[in-house]
Structures are given as C-alpha cells and as structure tokens.
Image: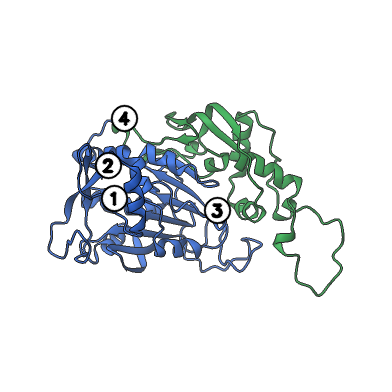
Chain colours: A blue, B green
Amino acid sequence: MPNPSTPAQTYETNHVHTVYEEIASHFSSTRYKPWPIVQTFLQTQPQGSIGADIGCGNGKYLRDKSQVWMVGCDRSTNLAKIASKNEPHSVIVADTLALPHPNGVFDFAICIAVIHHLSTAARRVEAVKCVLDLLRRPCSSSSSSTSIFTSSATPSGPGGGGGDDEGGKALIYVWALEQKDSRRGWDEGHEQDVMVPWVLKQKKEKQEKGRRKKGGDEEVGAEETKQEGDKTFLRYYHLYRKGELESDIEQAGGVVLESGYEKDNWWAIARLR
Amino acid sequence: MKLLTLNFLTCAIKTCKTNSASFPLHPRDAELEIVEADVNLPFLKNILPRLMWDELRGICTELGLPELPATPPTPADLIQPSSSTPETTDAAPIAEADEEPSQTAKDLHRVLLETCIQEGKLVCGACEHEYAVKEGVANFLLPGHLV
C-alpha cells in the first residue's frame, strides 16, 4: 500500500480508497445502468476517437465496443480488475492526481462521480486539471502525432481536417448538494462535506434482484435497512453547489462548453483554454 | 494489457512527464499472451496516425517480437487489394464494410491488440521506477514519497 504523506491523502485513503477496495464487488453489482448524458457524450464522439475514463469503477462506460477506444483507470485495484474484462478497452490502476498518460493525447475524457471524493478544494481543482491535461490541445498549429478527427463524416479517417479544432473535450460529473427530492434530501445550505454509508449485505441473492428492479438509482443498495452481519462503510463526499463545478474547471484552466444538472448530479463538458 | 496501451502511457511521476526518456515505458520480465480478437479495420485506420511508431518498434524489439516495418503503414496498406476490379464507375467508393484487412493490417492487429502483457513490470526510462503488471492490469499507484 502507498504510504500517504499528507493529511488529505491519508483521509482519502481511509474514507474513500479503502472503502471502494472492500465494497468493489457489491458496488459493481449495483452499477450497470449508464447515465444518459454520459452515454450520449460517448456516442457523439467521432468513430475511432481515443478516450480516457478517469475513475472508471467497474467499467460500465467501457461496454461499448465499436465507436471509440478507451483507457480506463481506477484507484481501486479490485474495481480495475472487474473493469478490465471489457474488451477491447484497456484498464489500469492509477490515481487521478498522478495519471500515467502523456499530456494532450486523448480526444476525449470522462470523469464520472470521482472528483467529489477529493477532500480539499485545491485537490479537486487539481483533479480537474489532471483530466483536462489529457486532452488534445485546442487549435492545430503544432503537433505532428496528434492528428485531428474533425468530422465523423470522413470515415476514411483523419488527414483532411480544418484548422479550427477545439481540441479534446472532457465530461465531468459530480454529486450535487441540491437534491431535495432524493431520498437523502440534501439541499442548498446543507453541509457540503458528508459521509455517506454503504451497507455491505451479508445475505445476497434475493436482495440483489430486488435492487435491480429499482432501476436507475445509482445508490440503491447502499443504504437499505441494516441487518445482522451487514457491514457499514462510510465514504467521504464533497457535495457540489450550483456553479461550483464550473468554477473548478475555470480555476483549472478550462473552458466550460456546456453544463447542467441531471438526477442529483452536476455535469459539465469542458476543454482546455 | 495490450501493447497498444503503451502508446498512451508514461510515468505517473509528474517531473518525469516532461522528460522524453519517460516515454515509452519499457516492459521488463514480461509474460506475454495472445488474446485473439476480431480485426477492426476502421479502428486500425483511425489509430494509425496516433501511433508513436518508432517507440512501438522499440518495444517490439525489447519484447523479442517480430520487427515492425521501419516506417508506419499508410491507411491504404491496411486494405487487401480487391482481386476483381470494380465494374461500376458511377458508384460511390467501395463501402468500408466491404474492405478486407491486408496482411499488414493483420500483423499490426496481432501486435497492438492481441499481444498482451499478463505479468511483469513497466519501467520508466527516466527515473527507473517500476510499475507492476498483474493479471493483465498495470498498477501506477505511487508510494507516498513520490506523489
């Protein structure tokens, strides 16, 4: 195990990384339904685009086999192992703040439900910067190896391309503070740094089915009635207020192209300035 | 981990990224496995301009794999020339679906997408840090003092 050297790292090791490592298998069984905006973002990437999935979890966005090729990474070795079954994509174990990728080589990146696990404002901005740094630089004047996919309408591949390329784009998702209609009921004014329980069930099979029926609720399975033998883990989250994600992106040197709210989460599509 | 992945990997240590010696990472004590997959011609064509060819050639040499050609193939090199000449002239170009992969494409597919490192290490050429590969998954978590 890494030997964390700052309080924030130690905190995240205890209240995020270790938890996911332990709940990986159960967590994965509740993560199967892609969120529509993420799916649309992936499906609108030109064919053959190269992407990064930062914090890929069990790899639920690595299921699509044709359109794009992605390198996924997760901080949890157990989740990365599960995710690595999604051929033809690749999966590695890596930390968002120390990604082993050259800068500027990816056409797109997604970072879904990850950055809210970082425990200081500076680390969250740094994480956004790490994601943005992966992206192809805007415009074109430089660079030989990073050919441009300007249009999906040229199936013969890159080469023609115009000069007004915006560079790669990243889709970032974080949990929202404003979710008064969710069963957690947080809303504006509530404490933003919270601990969220995950109940690891001992008896599995029947409850598994019950959970599936509930459909799209991302956190289903986490907080049901605790029974004997169940083990509760607490995960740290920073709940984002309206506008906070956009502000983080700007501080990280990015430009917000689109942003919005979907089902208890804030999302934004950004590129490098 | 397929060899293509190495085209998109470098050292996780920030100070190494600006050092050209950190790319590519060098496989060491690698156990290779061929994991067969269907050839995806459009994908190969798309990925071609993204390949750091000389570096990939070097990796193949280090792994004792058959040598890659000195220069990267062109997209046309990846398509098997049709034996029958197209009869119609006014038709659109041959649909992609009808194209067959050439031997060059199959060879490239073999190296990049079917040849996988199952166990071993990836070593940074700049700082010599070693990243373990286990069960086909490379681990880039750094010890605390290097973060």
Number of other residues with Cα within 10 Å of mark 3, as a class: few under 14, some 14 to 19, many 20 or more: few
Label drawn at residue A201: 2
Q: CA distance from mark 4 to mark 3?
A: 33 Å
Q: CA distance from mark 2 to mark 1?
A: 9 Å
> Residue A180 placed where, x, y %?
19, 66
Between marks 2 and 3 in the image, the one whose residue lies nearer the viewer: 2
Identified at 32% across, 31% down, the residue is: B143
Tag 1 residue: A221
Q: Earlier in the sequence, mark 4 or mark 3?
A: 4
Residue type at the position of mark 3: Lys
Q: CA distance from mark 1 to mark 4?
A: 28 Å
Number of other residues with Cα within 10 Å of mark 1, as a class: few under 14, some 14 to 19, many 20 or more: many
Q: Are marks 2 and 3 on the same chain?
A: yes
Q: Earlier in the sequence, mark 2 or mark 3?
A: 3
Element class at badge 1? loop
Q: Nearer the viewer, residue A228 or B87?
A: A228
Q: Is residue A102 left or right of residue A88?
A: left
Label drawn at residue B117: none
Tag 3 residue: A65
